[in-house]
Image: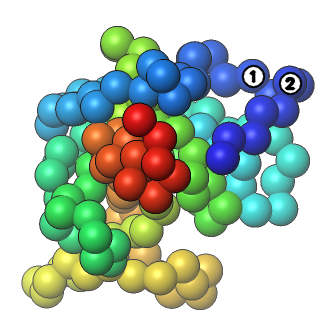
Amino acid sequence: ALLEIPSLKPPFQIPIWEKLESTDVSTGAELAVAGLPHSVNRLIIDTRGYVLDSASHRHLIPLAESLIEVQGAHGEFGMSGGPAIETKSGKFAGILSHQFLRMIPGGRTIVGEFAPSREQLENHLLVIPASLVRKWCAQVLGAA
């Protein structure tokens, strides 16, 4: 489902189902993300993101083979489900899952859960790829 709030228009077109393409983004591609953070009544749009890894396996979604790992864009609790758009082409790259990765110096990078009190050295956004979104919608919703 997509909620449209007329007073909150992003500077990009959010695709309708018929135009939702299985867009593959490559490492280094620039991405814009948008969402409504928890307890905030204004749309956050950040165009500073870039793809750190186009096929990251560092996530907690069992049915996803890989996710898109994004660095540089602002994202916070509550923006899950917001769109990620490739800025140069304007194509839908996927939706924010908003898990974050906690980088531990000298240790393994782990997927963590949101905890404001926990020290976080780096925050990456994880995006469910458009191809997976389309596949899921087709299977679960019976959309063609």
In the rendered structure, find residue 103 and report the number of the disc placed on it. none
Q: Residue at x 22, y 32 (%)?
A: 25
Protein image colouring: rainbow
Whether residue 133 is situated above or below residue 27 in the rendered picture: below
Counting the numbered discs, the total is 2
Q: Quadrant of residue 22?
A: top left
Could you say where residue 42 lies in the image, as x and y percent from the top left?
82, 41
Q: Is residue 97 left or right of residue 70?
A: right
Q: Nearer the viewer, residue 22 or 144?
A: 144
Q: Is residue 80 visible?
A: yes
Q: Nearer the viewer, residue 15 or 104?
A: 15
Going by the numbered disc 2, the residue's amino acid type is Pro
Residue to which mark 1 is pinned: 9
**Proximity of marks 1 and 2: CB atoms separated by less than 8 Å:** yes
Could you say where residue 99 lies in the image, as x and y percent from the top left?
43, 68
Q: Is residue 127 visible?
A: no
Helix, strand or loop at label 1? It is loop
Label 2 crowd bin: few (<14), some (14–19), many (20+), radius 10 Å: few
Helix, strand or loop at label 2? It is loop
Going by the numbered disc 1, the residue's amino acid type is Lys
Q: Quadrant of residue 115?
A: bottom right
Q: Residue at x 41, y 35 (%)?
A: 144
In the rendered structure, find residue 6 and report the number of the disc placed on it. 2
Could you say where residue 121 lies in the image, as x and y percent from the top left?
36, 71
Could you say where residue 117 lies in the image, as x and y percent from the top left?
59, 87
Residue at mark 1 to residue at mark 2: CA–CA distance? 6 Å
